Amino acid sequence: MKADLHVHTDHSSDGVSSVSEVLEAARSLGMGCIAITDHNTMAGYHEAKRYSDGMILVPAMEVSSADGHILAYGLTEEVAAGMSVKETVAAIHAAGGIAVAAHPYRTWSGLGESNVIEDFDAIEVLNGRSAEKGNRSALNLARKMGKPVTGGSDAHKIEQMGDAYSILPSDCQNADDVIDAIKQGKVSVAGGSRTAMGTLRYVYKAVSEWIGRGFRRM
């Protein structure tokens, strides 16, 4: 089963597409599962519950820790931004979720290798908006640490969806099954990395948004 486990909607400050547009795009791409991972909010997930119509919807968000972004799946409540990596992972676990190191080698928002601690449940090793080198390094890190893997487009508009995704076991029936598959290392990844032109667009966008935030990380 194809699943995009890293998608943003207009509930993220830098997202463009509506929840309904994201779900429609996911269906057109043959996705059976999606995780809306808006920055520091589960509002996108809660809205999506009204439109999911048979698609597996994983409760999720992307949390901005003090040292980079962390994907949280299976949450029963939102987790606050701004804490240390260890505190953030602990808070995700306390909220019933699992913590995944998002695009760890990305310059602007990745954790960096030193912050990918053993407490993480998995590592995102294929991100559609990360450069090939960063994705390759993430995969090598996951293998070195013996961690399960995930993949996702990290789409901020529907045109980016499907660039990278996870492949789940065909017997996944609900969000709990998806979480178990991740934890048990039964998830594989497919798709590609950011192109050279995509890198130019990404750097321009990242720098512009960084300046707009007053030189603060998201």
Image (cartoon, grey):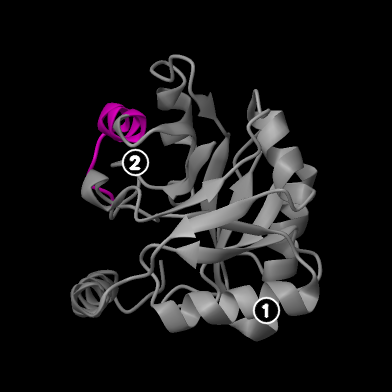
Sequence order check: which comes first, mark 1 or mark 2? Answer: 2
User: Going 76% across and 65% down the picture, which residue do you hit?
Assistant: 147
- Mark 1 or mark 2, whichever is nearer to me: 1
Going by the numbered disc 1, the residue's amino acid type is Leu
* Above/below status of 40 relative to 49: below
Q: Is residue 181 left or right of residue 47?
A: right
Q: Is residue 1 left or right of residue 52?
A: right
Q: Which residue is mark 1?
A: 141
**Horizontal and vertical percent position of residue 168:** 61, 41
Who is closer to the viewer here, 99 or 32? 32
Q: Which residue is mark 2?
A: 11
**Horizontal and vertical percent position of residue 83:** 64, 64
- Residue 67 numbered tag: none
On whether residue 16 falls in the magenta region, the answer is yes
Q: Residues within 10 Å of mark 2 (few under 14, many from 20)?
A: many
Secondary element type, mark 1: helix
Q: Which residues are magenta?
A: 15-27
User: Going 54% across and 56% down the picture, which residue do you hit?
Assistant: 189
Secondary element type, mark 2: loop
The secondary structure that most of the magenta stretch takes on is: helix
User: Can residue 51 be seen by looking at this rendering?
Assistant: yes
**Horizontal and vertical percent position of residue 191:** 42, 58
User: Going 81% across and 70% down the picture, which residue do you hit?
Assistant: 118
**Horizontal and vertical percent position of residue 154:** 40, 56
Labelled pair 1, 2 in contact (Cβ < 8 Å): no
* Above/below status of 184 relative to 211: above
The extreme front residue here reads 170
On whether residue 35 falls in the magenta region, the answer is no
Task: Report the Cα–Cα distance between label 1 and label 2.
Answer: 31 Å
User: Can residue 80 be seen by looking at this rendering?
Assistant: no
